[in-house]
Amino acid sequence: MENFNPLRDAIPVGEIRRALVIKLRHHGDVLVSSPVFSVLKAHAPQAEIDALVYADTAEMVTLHPAVAQVHTIDRKWKQLGVLGQARAELALYSALKARGYDLIIHLTEHWRGAWLCKLLKPRWAVGPVVKGRPKRWKTSFTHLQTMHNAQRHMAETNLDALRRLGIQPRADERRLTLVPGAAAEAVVAGHLAGFGLAGKDFIHVHPASRWFFKCWPVARMAALVARLQAQGHAVVLTAAPSADEKAMLDAIQARLQRPAFSLSGQLSLKELAALTQAAKLFIGVDSAPMHIAAAVGTPTVALFGPSGDKQWGPWGVPSRVITSGTHLCRPCGHDGCGGGKVSDCLTAIEVDAVLKAAQELFPA
């Protein structure tokens, strides 16, 4: 009875030789799909499992212990002209065809996944139900997965693709996975030594998101950092190399009596993961670095405004999610109230609430 599976079209996992998991989205989305690789490998240990992601997100899955090969699509192929892009696409198709996939797991509504299922002809293929899609979408897959439950975390939604195939994830298999690697860890150790810091003796704060309507006001973030410093905590600030994020960090630093340690725009994604892994606590907003913190097991304080914390909160790690608690209109998903790039539900979050959450997560 223990092995009974009521799903009539469950696939025989012991017959999977090679599988391809397709996740063509942003960094955080790719990282939140990492349990799919772990669970599939645990249930089909004989299988080689590949990933297909955008080139700029590849570091989210490289070195994952369950991933055999990472195939990438470069968004810059469009700049190569018609012939150049065609050559790049053909090279990708040839590489995928040569792998001979038995199973394709397509985790988004991107049409490319359906096309690849048609072209590569795997024995099994699972993709999402997408309202309004024509018959050619549905017939691209042997199995269709229901999606879009706003109360369900995206890590579980991704795993639902496996459940649809008859693979039931165990609780201990579902955590996010990101491996920084020895090279990244060495770079970060050098930075920390230069600051006079070592592992687990600092707080990592990443204030920005690529979408600024998800960000807490600069003045409040600066006030939080100052309060943490006053309590004797070393704080390391980070930002992406973009001019906007670096400007935000500069504005925070300008408000501090004693500037925090900063690695603004200096780290690769793997190095950012290594830094977060070395921290005793991560504080940030709904962003890829917040998911990175969860993936490397660092306790996390995450500030959420218009985006949905039930779907996108820190997964599988000691955490606190901070929301205003008074704005019943959230999560709305809008780019600021009225499209004005400023979210009232974020500006309403008090420094004391974030500080209290941080104190609850400090190692004893």
Image: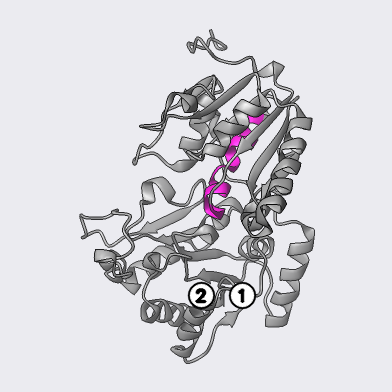
Q: Secondary structure at mark 2?
A: helix
Q: Which mark is residue 144?
A: none
Residue toward you, 109 or 161? 109
Residue density around tag 2, few if under 14, some if 14–19, many if 20 or more, within 10 Å = many
Quickly name the residue at label 1. Answer: 265
Q: Is residue 102 left or right of residue 252?
A: right
Residue 350 inside the magenta-drawn segment: no
Q: Is residue 17 left or right of residue 302?
A: right
Count every numbered label the image shows and give the total.
2
- Residue occupying image coordinates x 65% and y 25%: 103
State which tag comes first along the sequence, 2 or 1: 2
Quickly name the residue at label 2. Answer: 245
Q: Position of residue 71 (x, y in %)?
A: 71, 44
Image height check: is 351 above or below 127?
below
Residue 37 inside the magenta-drawn segment: yes
Verify CB contact (< 8 Å) between mark 2 and mark 1: yes
The secondary structure making up most of the magenta span is: helix
Residue density around tag 1, few if under 14, some if 14–19, many if 20 or more, within 10 Å = some
| Amino acid tagged 1 | Gly
Q: Position of residue 250 (x, y in %)?
A: 51, 85
Which range of residues does the magenta coloring cover?
26-40
Q: Is residue 163 left or right of residue 182?
A: left
Image height check: is 325 above or below 232?
above
